[in-house]
Amino acid sequence: MKLWLLVLLLGLCAFQPVPATYKLDPAASRITWTGYAEVGDYAPTGTVQVRQGEVAYDGRRLHQGRVEVDMRTIAQDQAQLAEHLRGPDFFDAARYPTAVFVLKEMQGAQALGYLTLKGVTKPVRFPLTITRLPTGQLRLHGVATLDRTQFGVNYNSSSFFQNLGSYAIRNEFRLEFEVVAIRG
């Protein structure tokens, strides 16, 4: 009897909820980017669209995930700037139409994974909040600050070019995202 009770207790303690797969809803998801001038306060902002993706969630935390971003959808109020950002000087969307983030693990409220941008894969880490909506959907919100030069985006970077003056662009850019995922 005692052995049976011990086995039952060990089994209950070892029980781990099985993660469910949630598909990202591109229409309900939003990614906003912000770039910064090296001098002054010029900071253009725009959007880029989620193409597809999925996450594994067990009711308490994410276990893994994959998000594909359609780089051809980089948008900004100034059409000429958006076109330049999609071009070879920046993200070369014709040659590299998709950026991919793969979540490896969560450490507390920090997402750790790998971002592939312009064919270059680098580790990234950023804070991530997960909200379970009354509809059963998940809302993932985070802000990541990335160094574009780590991915070969060197245009007007003072790390690579001298005497740029007011044309210099900061290496760091900011991505803020709110992604909605549906169980299924």
Image: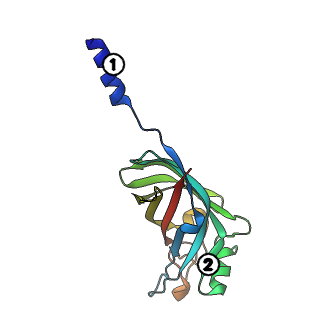
Name the residue nearer the viewer: 157 or 137: 137
Q: In the rendering, at what x and y percent does residue 177 appear? A: 49, 67
Rendered view: 157 above or below 51: below
Secondary structure under badge 1? helix
Q: Which amino acid type is marked by label 1?
A: Val
Q: In the rendering, at what x and y percent does residue 96 appear? A: 69, 64
Residue pointed to by mark 1? 7
Residue 54 falls left or right of residue 128: right
Which residue reaches farthest left? 2
Report how many numbered discs are placed on residues in the image.
2
Residue pointed to by mark 2? 75
Rendered view: 17 above or below 148: above
> Measuring 53% from the left and 56% from the top, which residue is drawn there?
182
Q: Which amino acid type is marked by label 2?
A: Ala
Q: In the rendering, at what x and y percent does residue 55 appear? A: 52, 51
CB under 8 Å between discs 1 and 2: no
Q: Specify whether residue 33 is in view.
A: yes
Determine the CA span between mark 1 and mark 2.
58 Å
Please identify the quarter of the rendering in which residue 84 is found: bottom right
Name the residue nearer the viewer: 172 or 16: 16
Q: In the rendering, at what x and y percent does residue 118 appear? A: 65, 63
